[in-house]
Image (tube, grey):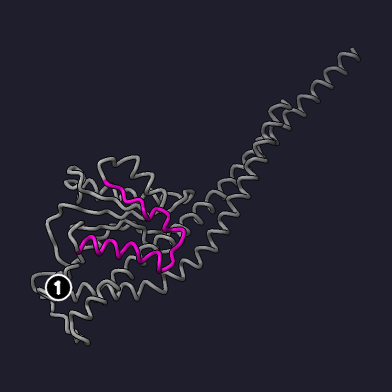
């Protein structure tokens, strides 16, 4: 019985140590979340408005050289960008994003993958490990796996610049990004969005005719769009990364909070079990003492 009590005490100590770790990780994630949440909340309205403006402009400009980012071509060569975290312990955060990537590969890009013309650009170690393990026919672009470690503008902008150049020169005919969109600390929406070509604005129904964008360009249209379109696409990609970072910290904070609660519940159960076992041990010892005394008295 003493061996069993010792084992239970050891388990209680182990759970206490684990609970301290999960509490600390929750606090760290909460601190990081506040900073990441402020960044995406401040940026999202600006980025979303720019993206809508870009879609509107490219939907209504015909035959312009700078509208090549909106030109749809038959998909021979495609690129899938997958954004995840570098570390785990954040619930199903990465798994859900990877599910979106699997759907894109088995659906939209099934032909390209079968032909060996699909390239995958993973950002985050979890995405990289998953792709290397599962998709041997795809070309893996490994240059930006550790991008999450430094989300400064000069580092981020390298990726959209490379994607835009690859689309413009015909290396890729279609580029899709899979990431997690931050909603709140407990909820993230997994997104698979077409990055290039820029999607056109469609009429809601047959009676809803899309109106021409009434934009005045100063300086001339070509000069302005040469700077405007890449700038908007760069900002949009930055938003993807900021959304994903905030979602990661929110998911980890939630997961660690739940783990801390589970540790508390397990510890309470172990204490009850320990007290019962100790009570049984004391009762047994008392019975032996009483029995021995009765035998001596008899």
Residue furthest out toward the left: 206
The vertical placement of 254 against 102, above or below, is below
Name the image quarter holding the C terminus.
Answer: top right
Task: State the SS at label 1.
Answer: helix
Residue furthest out toward the right: 297
- The stretch drawn in magenta includes residue 190: no
- The answer to which quarter of the image holds residue 281 is top right
Q: Nearer the viewer, residue 204 or 25?
A: 25
Q: Position of residue 215 (x, y in %)?
A: 19, 84
Q: Position of residue 143 (x, y in %)?
A: 36, 54
Judged by its main secondary structure, the magenta piece is helix
Query: Residue tagged by mark 1?
Result: 65
| Stretch in magenta | 139-168
Instruction: Left or right? Give the position of 235 relative to 67.
Output: right
Instruction: Left or right? Give the position of 188 relative to 294.
Output: left
- The answer to which quarter of the image holds residue 282 is top right
Residue furthest out toward the top: 298
The vertical placement of 171 against 288, above or below, is below
Q: Nearer the viewer, residue 103 or 72?
A: 72
């Amino acid at each position: 019985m003493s061996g069993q009590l010792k084992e239970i005490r050891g388990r209680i100590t182990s759970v206490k140590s684990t609970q301290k770790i999960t509490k600390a990780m929750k606090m760290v994630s909460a601190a990081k979340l506040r900073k990441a949440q402020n960044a995406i909340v401040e940026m999202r309205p600006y980025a979303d408005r720019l993206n809508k403006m870009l879609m509107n402009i490219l939907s209504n400009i015909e035959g312009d050289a700078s509208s090549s980012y909106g030109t749809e071509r038959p998909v021979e060569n495609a690129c899938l960008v997958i954004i995840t975290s570098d570390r785990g312990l954040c619930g199903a955060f990465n798994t859900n994003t990877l599910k979106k990537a699997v759907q894109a590969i088995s659906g939209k890009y099934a032909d390209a993958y079968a032909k060996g013309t699909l390239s995958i650009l993973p950002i985050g170690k979890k995405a990289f490990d998953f792709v290397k393990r599962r998709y041997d026919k795809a070309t893996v672009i490994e240059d930006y796996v550790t991008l999450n470690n430094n989300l400064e503008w000069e580092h981020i902008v390298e990726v959209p610049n490379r994607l835009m150049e690859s689309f413009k020169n015909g290396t890729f005919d279609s580029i899709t990004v899979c990431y997690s969109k931050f909603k709140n600390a407990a909820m993230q929406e997994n997104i698979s969005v077409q990055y290039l070509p820029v999607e056109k604005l469609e009429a809601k129904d047959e009676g809803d005719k899309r109106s021409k964008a009434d934009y005045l360009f100063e300086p001339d249209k070509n000069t302005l769009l040469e700077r405007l379109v890449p700038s908007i696409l760069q900002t949009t990609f930055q938003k993807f990364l900021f959304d994903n970072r905030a979602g990661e910290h929110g998911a980890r904070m939630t997961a660690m909070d739940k783990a801390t609660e589970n540790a508390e519940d397990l510890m309470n159960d172990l204490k009850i079990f320990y007290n019962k076992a100790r009570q049984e041990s004391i009762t047994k010892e008392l019975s032996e003492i009483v029995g021995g005394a009765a035998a001596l008295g008899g």
